[in-house]
Image (tube, helix red, strand yellow):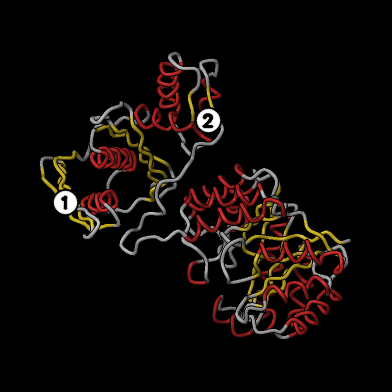
Amino acid sequence: MRSITISDITMKQSVGEGGFALSFREKIELAKLLDKLEVPVIETAPILSRRTDSLLIKSLASAVKGSTIAVPVSLTEADTVDLTWNALKEAVHPRLQVAAPVSTVQMEYLCHMKSAELLERVRTLVAAAKAVCPEVEFVAEDAGRSEKDFLREIIAAAVESGAGIITICDTAGTLMPEEFYDSVARAREDIPAAVRLGVLISNELSLADACAVAALRAGADEVKAAACGSFTVSLEKLVHILKVRGEDCGVTCAVRSTQLQRIVTQIRRMCETRRGKTSPFDSGVQDNAEGTVLTIHDDLSAVTKAVASIGYDLSEEDAVKVYEAFGRIASKKEQVGIRELDAIVASAALQVPPTYRVESYVINSGNVITATSHVRMEKGGVMLDGLAVGDGPIDASFLAIEQIVGHHYELDDFQIQAVTEGREAMGETVVRLRASGGKLYSGRGISTDIIGSSIRAYVSAVNKIVYEEGET
């Protein structure tokens, strides 16, 4: 029985190609779920924003404990291998990918290169990637429409330069299963037995799953699939097919089929949750209360590590302030959880003079009207007004604040909890925003009005970003 590899590309696909607009935090959670499912390879998109995307890859490398993390390098940027490897190198199982369109049309349209130039570029990139990373994959995009002689030549060049995995792509998705079988069989004959052969299949004709089975029967070792989305092979369907008929095909896979349906359902809920057309924010309140708990016996190092695990990058001074605040709370109770630690960071770290002050807010909301929010804030003695509609009063309020500030920040987390009891209970809100450079900032607000506490928490986080990054 051959053990085949399934490589998940849910996170890699862009919205325009059928993928999903996931937030920074959702991508980390998605990777953790796939790792828990023991999916052998998790793929992510290439580095486009040097700061934010590099931070994402570093975070994925830290969060994923068993799966391989695969990241493509750029065909055009000179320092792409070093840049990508520096972000990926801490992964337990790293993989660098060199992807290139090999059909004449895409070669000239997408990367503006002739065949000879592309061939040399692939040879150089694969060699450079192999010099730093033990596992390198060459992805031949649009292989189904390529010139057969050139496809053989560029695959041979990639193998000679150190690629241990060759992936051929039916990007158009127009091949029938028997045609794809022949294509994979020819490719298998052309590459050494020690080199693994992978496939990526577009689901244009809704035949991707059938073509994947045909490819495995023809000798493919790896299939790219998606836990959510209909743009390629379905992870859930492929694992089920292999569970039922894998023995007949002589193949097996390591994905945990017993947990498959439950975890895929979680992933779909994350990816497919409806986002309001008027709101740039993600799918709202999420549960980040993982099993980590701290006690009074934990030292500065343990607290700092726990803070880092939820995404904060604190200075030494702020780490000490957070630890001191943690100590005061831990001395009064047996355990301090992640949510409480989040609130401690919001209240103790990076306390700055406020650039913006909330003066007033007026909310209109109901079950038969669209929520609107009018927020007035003061900055340097000048009154500034923001008016916005949203999916609810809090969403509308955050959008009104963004009008005033003139900038959108990714909402990484939003927590509300009661801190006193009774009809006049105080509500505490913690908002975490991710700035353009990828760093997290949190704000805290307390009020008997949860909308008021949410507005104050959001403005508190914005003030920290403005203070540290400066205004443009």
Callout 2, which amino acid?
Ala
* Residue at image location 44% in from the left, 29% down from the top: 341
Depth check, front residue: 459 or 151: 459
Circle 1 sits in a helix, a strand or a loop, which is it? strand
Where residue 358 sits in the image (x, y, percent)?
18, 40
Task: Report the side of 372 relative to 343 (left or right).
Answer: left
Give the answer, above or below, for where 400 lies relative to 333.
below
* Residue at image location 48% in from the left, 24% down from the top: 336
Q: Which residue is mark 1?
A: 374
Identify the residue at the far top of this view: 331
Task: Report the side of 10 relative to 406 (left or right).
Answer: right
Where residue 406 sits in the image (x, y, percent)?
25, 54
Circle 2 sits in a helix, a strand or a loop, which is it? helix
Callout 1: few (<14), some (14-19), or many (20+) C-alpha neighbours within 10 Å?
A: some
Q: Is residue 132 visible?
A: no
Where residue 19 sits in the image (x, y, percent)?
52, 66
Depth check, front residue: 71 or 271: 271
Camera-nearest label, 1 or 2: 1
Q: Which mark is residue 306?
A: 2
